[in-house]
Amino acid sequence: MAHPVANDSYRSLRNDISELLEAGKNRAARALEDELVKTYHAVGKEISAHLDNRGEESTYGAQLVERLAGDVGLGIRLLYDCIRFFRQFPTLPTSTDLGWSHLRVLFMLPTPALRNQFLHTAADEGWTVRELRDQVQKQVVAEPKPVRTPRDHLPPLRGRLYTYKRQVTDGAARLDLGFHISRAWPKGIADAPVVHSVLTDGALSLEPTQGRRDTFYTYRATLQRVIDGDTLWVNIDCGFDTWTDQKLRLRGIDAAEMDTPEGQRARRFVESALRKCPVLAITTTKPDKYDRYLADVFYMPEESDVNVVLEQGLFLNRELIEAGLAKRV
């Protein structure tokens, strides 16, 4: 005669087995993440060494990455992130349990000291990726001015979305949306030099804020057309149900003319980089002599959250320099 399993004994066994399985899954996931980080670091090291051996043949870099992406089945952005990972962390970080998503957030920080500081703080405090991103973004915005770097480095201007200055026209306060577009100062909003649009429970409100000059004029945009390696047509969301089409010139760089092989490669690079980008994040400064606004353009393939693109996205201007397809001006 079969003996029934004692309920208490069975529940205890079941719970023990469940805990063992869960712990095993967690160890396996952690081991997989560790191997992923090691692999991406090794990939970045291999590509960097290969590029360094080419010496002056800097235009080779973009062609190499594009070809590798197709042949090995990794995205162009991921390969560039591997290169950046190795160059920013020549020694693989092994003293923390941070995964690849955490490490990519650290790419935003301008100095090795800051990257190492946030690396260890995030591990000690157990920050999630979002918490780390929030802390890094606060650090980037709080910088009083861009960190001085070699001229060819081109520090990015990552501003703050939906931040507006107050202007006075014919004695009336107006909200400066940029691009010579303004709106009447909203009723019920106290006068302030700078305001930030905040969405709360589905309703928009304006709150006084502060920021550097390059905090302003940062927008969500969608690509319309790549004109050449350093010029784009985009549709820009200025906020307040206002959009504008603008021709942008990438700030701080100069790509070769389109009637040259180098210029054609630069345009193909930009087209390939932005092809799968549903949104772009841009920070504009001033018009050039042809009335094209100078812009820093940030992109992240297949990412539709503009805040993530702004905070973590690749800096197109600098990507062109590093690929040898544009020079710093």
Image (cartoon, grey):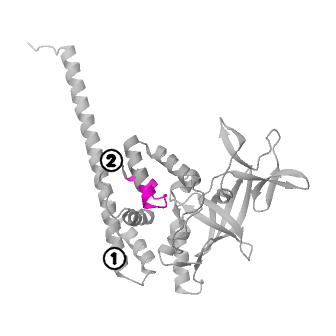
Q: Which residue is mark 2?
A: 97
- Which quadrant: the N terminus? top left
Q: Residue furthest left?
A: 1
As displayed, is residue 154 above or below residue 133?
below
Observer-nearest of 228 and 138: 138
Which residue is at a point 53% across and 52% down the rendered structure image? 139
* Magenta region, main secondary structure: helix
Q: Amino acid at mark 2?
A: Asp
Q: Which residue is mark 1?
A: 50
Which residue is at a point 58% across and 52% down the rendered structure image? 142
Magenta segment, which residues? 100-115
Residue 282 falls in image quadrant: bottom right
Q: Is residue 103 magenta?
A: yes
Q: Is residue 198 magenta?
A: no
Residue 146 spot, x, y in % from top left: 57, 62
> Would residue 24 appear left or right of 199 to someone viewing this image?
left
Which residue is at a point 62% across and 71% down the rendered structure image? 251
